[in-house]
Image (tube, helix red, strand yellow):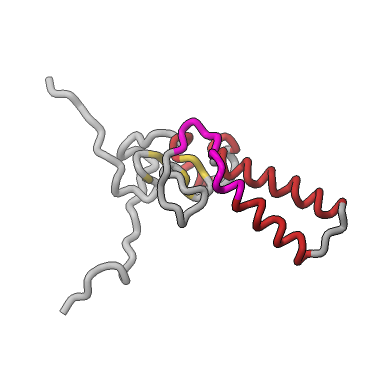
Amino acid sequence: MGLLTRLPGTACAFFERGRCFYEERLNPGYHEEWRCLVLQRWESVYEDFLRQADAFGLEDAAASGLWQRRFERLAGADPQCPSFQPGREDEPPGCVFAQEGLCLLSLPLCEGQCARFKPRVLDPAASPAKE
């Protein structure tokens, strides 16, 4: 008897780097535990900053400049995530596992072509022109 293996889900609309985005697409943001820890920390620091700026009655222009400097230090500091691996710096937080505000490592592994399999829709503008 041969070994039965699942086909890969690479052509599925929910497949992203070996992970399944089905549940996230179904209920965006429902699974708080899938959110990127670094981005969660940045949001918390920002909320604290807003409370402080409000308490001190800072003008918007002054608060904006202060936040810009604070964020530059925050973004340049150790990300404090055990799974952080540097990736594209133009996509905050600059981790290879961060996508759409989520940590790919937290999402379920793709099971392959399953009952939720949905073919990717190809962008006609991305395909080569026929002559």
Q: Residue at x 63, y 45 (%)?
A: 42
| Image quadrant containing the C terminus | bottom left
Measured from the top left, where is residue 64 in percent x and y?
A: 71, 61
Quadrant of the image containing the N terminus: top left
Q: Which residues are magenta?
A: 73-84
**Residue 77 x, y percent position in the rendering:** 56, 42
Residue 102 in the magenta stretch? The answer is no
Residue at the image position 69 percent from the left and 55 percent from the top: 67
119 lies above or below 86: below
| Residue in the foreground of this view, choosing between 106 and 118 | 106
User: Looking at the magenta stretch, what is its main secondary structure?
Assistant: loop
Outermost bottom residue: 131
Q: Residue at x 25, y 33 (%)?
A: 6
Decide: is 122 above or below 42.
below
Furthest toward the top, the residue is 1
Report x, y in % for residue 103. Answer: 49, 40
> Which residue extends farthest left?
1
Relative to residue 117, is residue 21 drawn left or right?
Answer: right
- Number of numbered tags placed on the structure image: 0
